[in-house]
Structure formats: C-alpha cells, structure tokens
Amino acid sequence: MNYDLIVIGSGPGGYVAAIRAAQLGMNVAVVERESLGGICLNWGCIPTKALLKSAQVFEYINHAADYGVVVDNAKPDFEKMVARSREVAQGMSKGIQFLFRKNKITVLNGFGKLLRGKKVEVTAEDGTKTEYSAKHIILATGARAKELPNLKIDDQKIIGYRKAMTLEKQPKRMVVVGAGAIGVEFAYFYHTIGTEVTIVEFMEQGLVPREDKDISKELGKLFKRKGINVMGNTSVEKVDSSGKTCKVTVKNRKSGKEEVIECDIVLSAAGVTPNTENIGLEALGITTDRGLVKVDDYYRTNVEGIYAIGDIIPGPALAHVASAEGITCVEKIAGLNPEPIDYNNIPSCTYCSPEIASVGYTEQAAKDAGFEIKVGKFPFTASGKAKAAGAPEGFVKVIFDAKYGEFLGAHMIGANVTEMIAEIVAARKLETTGHEIIKSIHPHPTMSEAVMEAAAAAYDEVIHL
C-alpha cells in the first residue's frame, strides 16, 4: 500500500498537513493510535476551554448582582462540567473524521513507527503489524506531560493535565506545580468552582514566567485577590502520597525555608515532553537534540523524505504553530515556494481569567536585542467598553522601535484579549509602524480601542489617560 504522503499523528499539525496535502492532489494516509485531533482537540486546547467557560459562567452568576440580576443558590456541578467538556471534544474529533472523508484521506489506526526505505509500520491495538510505504513521511507525534524527578505521576493523587480534565470528583485542595499556561488555566478553573488552590512555580518571575514581567505581575496580583495562593521562586522537594492526602514539601529558593502543603491532588503542569521514543528515529539515523528532532526551515530532517513538525521539534509547543508548520511543509513538498515561518511573530494565548495574549518581543527582550524602544500602556480601567462589561482588570502594553517605529511586540491581559492579538500579528506581518496603528480608526466602544490608545501612549499622544 503506497501513498504520496503518510503523516504519523493527527493533532493540529498532522491533520492540517494531511488536509493541505490532499488539497494539493496527494494521496494521503494518517496514522493515529487514539482519537483523531490528537491531544489538542481531545485532551488539550478544546476541552480545557469548555471547562474554563463553565467556570467563567459560574463566576458571572456569582457576580450577577453587580449587573442588576438576582440569582439564588447557584452551585457548580463538577460531573456535568466534565461531561460537557468531553462532549465538546468528541464533537470536534468527529469533525476531523468528516474532513478526512471529504478530502479522501485514509486513516490507519495504530502506533506508527518508521522503517528503512520510506516505510511505516503500523501496530494495531490487537498487535497486528502492517507495513505501508510513501514518497514522503511527516512525523507529528506531539508531546505529553513532563514528569519532574520529585513528582512521579500516578494518575491517582499526582496527576497530569489529561487526568485533571476527567477527575471523578472535585478535590477540596489542590497544588498546581508549574505556572505556565496549563498551570494557571487549571488553577483558575478549580479555584473558581471552589477548590482551594496553591500554585508552585520554580522561576523567580512567578506566574506565566515566559510572558512580559508586567503581565506576570498583574496576573499575580489578580490571582491573589481571587484567593489563589501563589508561591514563586519555589521548588518542590518531595511529595508524600502514601496517606489519605498528599504532603508536598516545597522550598523557597531565595530564603531556603521549607514548608509542607497538604492537599488532595497534585497537578503536574511543568511543561511537556516530546513523543519521540520508539518511533524509529535511531534506526534511521535521524538527528535529535535532547529528544527534539532537528529540521530545516521547511521541516526536513537529515534523512531524505522524512519530515517533522509540531511539539517534537524546537520551538513553541502551540497548536497553531504546528498547523502552520504542517502547511509550510506540505506546500514545499508539493513544489510550491512557501515563506518560512517567522517564529518571532507567533501569538501566545492563556485562557485563565483574565486572559493573556502576547506576540513579539517583551520589553526586556527588546532591550537585550539592542533596540531603543518606546513603550505604551493603556489600562482597561480607562476603557468604556471594559467598564460597561464589568471587566476593568488588566491592560494593553505595546513596544515600538524608537528609530523606525517598528512594532516590536504587544502584551495584553484582560477580558477577551485572546480575540484581540491577531490584529498585532497582522500588523507586524505587514510591517506596520506605531503611527499607522494610531491613525487606524478603531470602533468605539470596544476593548480593541486599547491597542490604538496604547500605541498613542507610546508617542505621548494618548487621549483618554
């Protein structure tokens, strides 16, 4: 059974690559051992957003009186929240099945492994092995939750993100280890529905340590106001899960002081590990670096005809990045001339409440890169739409090159800012300057006006501050 292209993995990188290849006239097969859509659609991006929406609705109801609405005796139904999340995920996976049928893409169910001679061995659930061949093979096997030396996931009391979405009952107390996007999203969800949450983050910056420092500081302030305990610059020394509860020993890295936190569940949210074991990399001599596959600008490995995209290559482990890489890869295979991806113009979104969205240089990174910069910030407390919506928390911060006006970066925290960041991505792609943003009329009243106002603030032209 010979194909033009076999894709191993059907996450946002794999399924998008497969569909684009089919559009370009290739005969395509996709190998998938679980559900179509990979981690993102089944256990990541989509079902987590369903859980977060449930928490947000509950939070709205708890503040209904602020809007002149009387609601009595509202309470969360944890089991129904989880069930709704799973239904949403299953619906999205079925959507991928439809798209595959529409584009005449073959699904090979099982675990895919590379063999010599551009072949893929697929092991079905019953152990049956079948070989397939292809002119081109794309590895899109994704990643899984990272295990820390002192934090062995047992899916009972010490869990990863997958189990956090399907717990049988809501824990009374939870420790979240890691304050990146996964950690703060689950912390917000569980805290909002009544779980006592403590976040432990190794990095000194605290919450969302890869974001601009002003964003991290603002989220920390707002989380503490909500009642979430945040411990930055703190390491997990050990976890004793032998009793009815977990006892988590943590140490402040600055003072050296240790303390023990007792909880029902420990959630390990300390990043991800690429799924590159046992897929045949070593046998073919494919070059890796610390488990990540080395590729060129068009995702070609050092072995002709073998490509890799998504979480198994260096770069941000984000669904939209994997999709863009998949499209670029197959367009190059098809003989087109796609532009390499600009990894400095990748938007990042975190869906806790308030939301976070960013793209480009942080203020510190811009300074480190040697730019003389102009920085503008506009708080949502000065936004009519934000005040009317009852969501005045947060701000928009923009960074420009002082010499040429280049749009270096933007960092937002507030309600619905993940829906606003695409404007900045497009503006940077089109090499838009600060003054062009200022002179682009933004509709009133909207949250997006804050982008225009922040740009104006950078040039001392802001009106509403």
Image (spheres, rainbow, N blue to C red):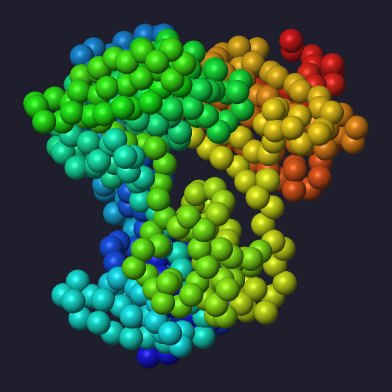
From the viewer's perspective, is residue 119 above or below residue 48?
A: below
Q: Quadrant of residue 280?
A: bottom left
User: Residue at the left extreme?
Assistant: 244
User: Residue at the right extreme?
Assistant: 403
Closer-to-camera residue (329/415): 329
Q: Name the side, left or right, on which 166 lies relative to 320.
A: left
Residue ID at (26%, 29%):
238
User: In the rendered image, is residue 147 in sight?
Assistant: yes
Closer-to-camera residue (109/99): 109
Give the number of marks: 0
Q: Position of residue 215 (x, y in %)?
A: 57, 23
Residue ID at (56%, 51%):
315
From the viewer's perspective, is residue 363 above or below residue 99?
A: above
Q: Position of residue 376 (x, y in %)?
A: 75, 21
Q: Name the side, left or right, on which 41 lies relative to 139.
A: left
Q: Name the side, left or right, on which 353 lies relative to 87.
A: right
From the viewer's perspective, is residue 61 above or below residue 66?
A: below
Residue ID at (15%, 31%):
241
From the viewer's perspective, is residue 180 above or below residue 199?
A: below
Residue ID at (55%, 18%):
217
Q: Quadrant of residue 330?
A: bottom right
Q: Position of residue 370 (x, y in %)?
A: 81, 34
User: Residue at the bottom extreme?
Assistant: 1
Closer-to-camera residue (10/104): 10
